[in-house]
Image (spheres, rainbow, N blue to C red):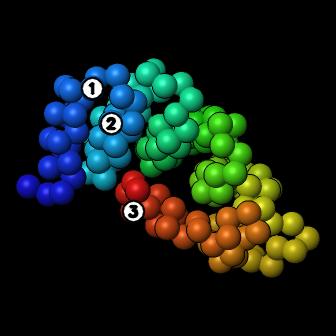
Amino acid sequence: MGEEQRAIQDLDKAIQLDPDNADIYVNRGSAYGSLGQFQRAIEDFDKAIHLDPDNGSAYANRGNAYGILGQFQRAIEDIDKTINLDPDFAVAYYNRGFTHNQLSQHQRAIQDYGVDPDWWTGGDLGSDPQERSPRCGGSHQHTRRSFERKQFS
């Protein structure tokens, strides 16, 4: 049995002890996401949001799951909510930019990456933005790899 599966078992027990704790559902949803069980992950993120409508992690992770499933508009809606709850969460801007890029909304992607379009010299946005955009500070590399590998943090 892998780490994620053991984590899910432990989180199942934690939910039995504290069924109104939104963070437990976020953690279990992340574990399901790591296993590629995105629909189950979304169900846990939904439960977390129901219990705590201001839980930015639940929206961020659900947005990632929707993005992985190709439901880009739903992903953007959740990422928007994440940013509204925590405007300083740089990775959320990167995720939204990455999602806009998937929708060929390149100008919006550039804005989310925090890059001045006149400064942009990266060429094709289908490849990769500059290693260190002003907004993301380079932290987006882990997020992009996670998104591409369908992994959650």
Q: Amino acid at mark 3?
A: Arg
Q: Which residue is mark 1?
A: 18
Q: Residue furthest right?
A: 118
Horizontal and vertical percent position of residue 16 = 19, 25
The kind of secondary structure element at disc 3 is helix
Question: Would you identify the image quadrant in which residue 15 lies?
Answer: top left
Contact check, label 2 and label 1, Cβ < 8 Å: yes
Mark toward the start of the polypeptide (1 vs 3):
1
Horizontal side of 28 relative to 91 (left or right) equals left
Residue at the image position 47 percent from the left and 37 percent from the top: 58
Q: Which mark is residue 24?
A: 2
Which quarter of the rendered picture does the C terminus lie within? Answer: bottom left
The kind of secondary structure element at disc 1 is loop
Q: Note whether 15 is above or below 86 in the view shown.
A: above
Mark toward the start of the polypeptide (2 vs 1):
1
Horizontal and vertical percent position of residue 117 = 86, 66
Mark toward the start of the polypeptide (2 vs 3):
2
Horizontal and vertical percent position of residue 129 = 68, 71
Q: Note whether 20 is above or below 89 in the view shown.
A: above
Contact check, label 2 and label 3, Cβ < 8 Å: no
Q: In this orientation, which residue lies closer to the viewer: 72 or 131?
A: 131
Classed neighbour count for the residue bearing mark 1: other residues with Cα under 10 Å, few (<14), some (14–19), many (≥20): few
Which quarter of the rendered picture does the N terminus lie within? Answer: bottom left
Q: Nearer the viewer, mark 2 or mark 1?
A: 1
Classed neighbour count for the residue bearing mark 2: other residues with Cα under 10 Å, few (<14), some (14–19), many (≥20): many
Horizontal side of 53 relative to 121 (left or right) equals left
How far apart are the alpha carbons under marks 2 and 1? Answer: 8 Å
